[in-house]
Image: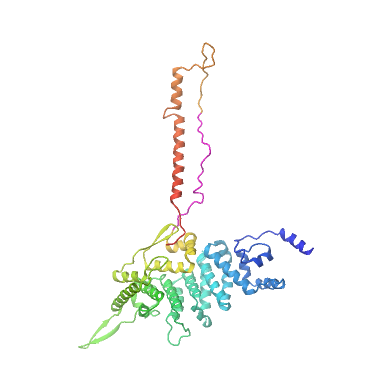
Amino acid sequence: MDNKRRNRKGSHRPTRTGILLDDDASADLGNFRGHPKSLQDYSRDLSEKSYTICLLLLILKFRFTLASLRQDALSSILKALTVNIEQKFVEQNFVTLVYQCLHPIKKGSPKEMKQAAHIIGLLSMITTSVDKVHEAYEDVLTALSQGELKSKLKTLEITGCLAVVTFFGASNSDETEQAMKLLWDFINPEPGHTIERKDSPAILSAAISAWTFLLSTIDGWRLDHKSWKGAISYFSNLLDSNDETACTAACEALALIFETNCLKKFSTEVKDFHHEGDTSIKIHPNTELKENIIKQLRRRLIETSNENTPSQNPNTGFNSVSAALNFLEDGKCLNSHVTIGGQKLTLSTWSQIIQLKFLQHFLGKDGFTKHMMENENFHNVFDFIPKRRNPSARKLYIPEREEVTIRFFQPPVPRHQDCSLLPFVSREEKQLEKKMTMSPNSHLSKARTRLLRKQRQLLSKERESDCFGFGDEFR
């Protein structure tokens, strides 16, 4: 009896509004609540209230633990924010979600930590609030600057999260360089440093890409004079690496450093060399260093061609080694073209190329295309204006019946003298009727012309809508 009353009462309860997600992923909890879960539901699952829900589920003998509840919420939110721009949900829940995701980063399982870090990055690139994203930047930087959490940078998702939050949340170059220093201490730790980096090519290349990604946002003259000494030498040594990803990351970093036109901030100091006759000559190593890098890149291209090693990016077809060599030799960055949603985007600088590659890797192919088409922050970064397609473009209105009605006054006509029913039409009346119906200047002819012109316009628009199609691929 109690069950029937409970079911009857639940049937009249209004359904919560929200974006419905993954019915199968939340089958147990969805059946308990009586409706599919929404983003708001998953957000609540990350809060302290989820402990009470989990306890209730255990009492009811549901095989649902707190960890699985939290992982289900994180994975569902991650999927939703990657493939959709849930602007309203993000703006309403930004601060709460960032706070809830920082906890798994500090104390969660490895899987929860990766998902939570990725979600914070997605929130930062979706929100349009400068204050909110700057607050997220401060929280993430503070958390990862703590001694026990610095080792988290070994995780690819944590590195990506730090880079994305800084890219969208840092308010000036000094704040950007703070995150870059944190990454640089991991990339090239000093002797006796607290961070012990394992020589994993994937982790190393990811950290270098994140560092280069942040460098692309700073003008060369704003960079600190002492923080990046020896960076050129370090990256040039990586050009001889056996790992293709580490070599590619080093190539892009070197190309961007030379593009900043502030080599003295990345190279060693000028030294005095004494020659015969006690003559002191100051020699700057940049010229010789550049020539050595060009030789290394040429040797690398020859080795990859002999070994048939793929050196192009599979998504963009971009060869970083070849492009960096051409840039150092000619001083010009080759224009690279990518197709996004049927539109061409031209990348004319290394900064643009590096930013696009990093964000595409962070979001994935489909997610990046979705954000490029609908995320206003991406439109501002790449100066990209998508051509909005009218959803009803293929449904042009074509009337089933077309009529043209013309009204004119006709005076009464006299009958024949034989009283027949046939009207008597005079010559003047015939000319008047011809003038009003067959003349090019008649109202009927003008109306017919307008109708034909309208039909041609409708047909032309229909053909344009068929020819102008958007593809979802990113070539």
Please determine whether, in this image, residue 49 is positioned above or below residue 460: below
Name the residue at the left extreme. Answer: 277
Magenta segment's dominant SS is loop
Quadrant in the rendering for residue 282: bottom left
Q: Residue at x 43, y 25 (%)?
A: 435
Image quadrant assignment for residue 216: bottom left
The picture places residue 368, in percent across and down from the top left corner, at: 47, 64
**Residue at the farthest right position:** 1
Nearest to the observer: residue 286 or residue 2? 2
Q: Is 115 left, or right, of 351 in this rendering?
A: right
Q: Quadrant of the N terminus?
A: bottom right
Tell me if 405 is positioned left or right of 318 in this view.
right
Q: Quadrant of the C terminus?
A: bottom left
Q: Quadrant of residue 283?
A: bottom left
Q: Give residue 382's position: percent from left, percent from top.
A: 42, 63
Q: Residue at x 55, y 68 (%)?
A: 78
Q: Residue furthest top?
A: 418
Q: Position of residue 90 (x, y in %)?
A: 56, 65
Residue 131 seen in the current view:
no
Is residue 351 found inside the magenta-colored segment of the image? no
User: Is 402 colored magenta in this rendering?
Assistant: yes
Magenta stretch: give its range.
Answer: 385-406
Q: Is residue 50 left or right of residue 85?
A: right
Residue furthest to the front: 307
Question: How many numbered callouts?
Answer: 0
Colouring style: rainbow
Q: Name the spot of residue 87 as percent of width and height, x first.
A: 54, 62
Determine whether, in the image, residue 181 is placed left or right of residue 82.
left
At x 56%, y 78%, the residue is 106
Residue 387 shows in the view: yes
